[in-house]
Image (cartoon, rainbow, N blue to C red):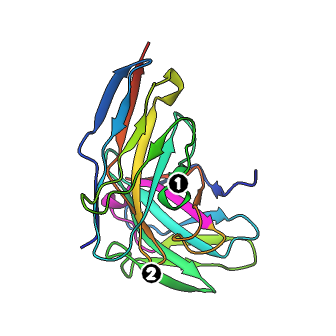
Amino acid sequence: EPEVTQTPSHQVTQMGQEVILRCVPISNHLYFYWYRQILGQKVEFLVSFYNNEISEKSEIFDDQFSVERPDGSNFTLKIRSTKLEDSAMYFCASSVMGVTNEKLFFGSGTQLSVL
Amino acid sequence: AQRVTQPEKLLSVFKGAPVELKCNYSYSGSPELFWYVQYSRQRLQLLLRHISRESIKGFTADLNKGETSFHLKKPFAQEEDSAMYYCALGYSSASKIIFGSGTRLSIRP
């Protein structure tokens, strides 16, 4: 079965630095998502992306966050100036159509540690 | 506001015993409900969704709109069912789903 791939699996950065988390969604999928999970807490929605623009974003997804699909295969999440509280597991997901009709396929996650 | 509540952080049952993982939701529209599962060292994956009305790995879940619940059930637990289970709500008018806080199911031999 095709998979969503995420790189790197672990990222350590200093507070205030920019990080880019990378994802390769499944090739025929049209909707892309980022979620995060702070240790011991729930999986939280960050943003959804369709047709090269943001469809929906949460209150967590402030001006420090941005997403991009720079080419036909990658989907990236950028955090401009990381804070300690950004430390979390970040999951990318994709679906053929919107979530209400199709299941989400998740990547294995990037563990971000901000020191 | 839309919300998914899973009241149990941990549920531990013996192998062969029935399992029920509770999920309640809050949404004024027409909900899409899902159960996702994460086995040890594996990625989060869909277990089942209410619209399909299917049984996967012996699990079923019935949407009860009156009680706003979508409990996950299995009559006879197996050791391989040990995992983290997340109930999730999709909005009919939005391109996202939100997750509950999860229940860790532990099956004792």
- Please tell me which residue is depicted at 50% across the width and 66% down the height of the picture: A34
Q: Give amino acid for label 2.
A: Glu
According to the picture, the residue beneath numbered tag 1 turns out to be B53
Residue A18 in the magenta stretch? The answer is no
Return the chain for callout 1.
B
Residue at label 2? A56
Q: Is residue A50 left or right of residue A47?
A: right
Q: Amino acid at mark 1?
A: Arg
Say few, some or many: other residues with alpha carbon within 10 Å of mark 2 (under 14 / 14 to 19 / 20 or more).
Answer: some
Name the residue at 24% across, 57% down. B67
Q: Nearer the viewer, residue A27 or A62?
A: A27
So how many labels did they put on this image?
Answer: 2
- The magenta span reads A80-94
Instruction: Evaluate whether residue A39 shows in this view.
Output: yes
Give the percent coordinates (x, y) of residue A113: 43, 51
| Labels 2 and 1 share a subunit | no
> Which quarter of the figure is the C terminus of chain B placed in?
top left
Q: Residue at x 39, y 52 (%)?
A: B87
